[in-house]
Image (cartoon, rainbow, N blue to C red):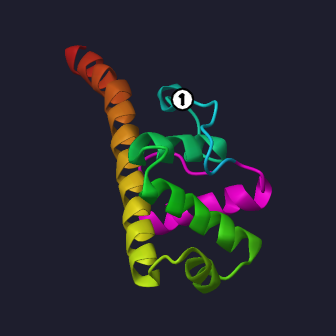
Amino acid sequence: MIYGANWDGPKVLARLEETFRRLPDAPIYSPTRFRFELLATGPVDGLKLIAASAHTLGAGSEAHVWLLTRAACVARGSSLVALCRIHGWPRTRFYAVTDAAAGEVADALNRRASALLNAKVTPLARDQGET
């Protein structure tokens, strides 16, 4: 589980893969019951990470579906080459889209963590400066 502003694309992919290993029936095409606004505290992991990626990329977007499909495929030990061939997806584009999507989710999570940290730190820093 990752707290704070420590996200990057490879970590997003790794955590999504772990989510699909632990929860093989986690949704790819259907919406989750979690709302990103509820993620103000605690780790972003599991279904919360899927919800955050849906919020960032758009639940029905190609980038989101491909990102989750890639993570689920890797989690099952399936071949990404075979996946792309079966679906007729250009492999180079598939990797480029999913890498960029993971980076976009990481950036959104880092911005969110930074905003939450600043919201918590700023009043404390102001209070300490007044004493």
Residue 5 located within the stretch drawn in magenta? yes
What amino acid does circle 1 point to? Arg
> Does residue 123 lie above or below 46 as drawn?
above
Name the element at disc 1: loop
* Residue 6 visible within the image: no
114, 73: nearer the viewer = 73
The residue positioned 54% from the left and 64% from the top of the image is 13
Q: Quadrant of residue 90?
A: bottom left
Q: Quadrant of residue 79?
A: bottom right
Residue 22 located within the stretch drawn in magenta? yes
The residue positioned 47% from the left and 27% from the top of the image is 37
> Does residue 56 lie above or below 17 as drawn?
above
For mark 1, what is the residue? 35
Left/right placement of residue 124 relative to residue 48 reads: left
> x, y percentage for residue 27?
67, 47
94, 38: nearer the viewer = 94
The residue positioned 74% from the left and 77% from the top of the image is 77
> Does residue 26 lie above or below 119 as drawn?
below
Specify start and end residues of the magenta stretch as a single range: 1-26
Left/right placement of residue 91 relative to residue 26 reads: left
> x, y percentage for residue 111?
33, 43
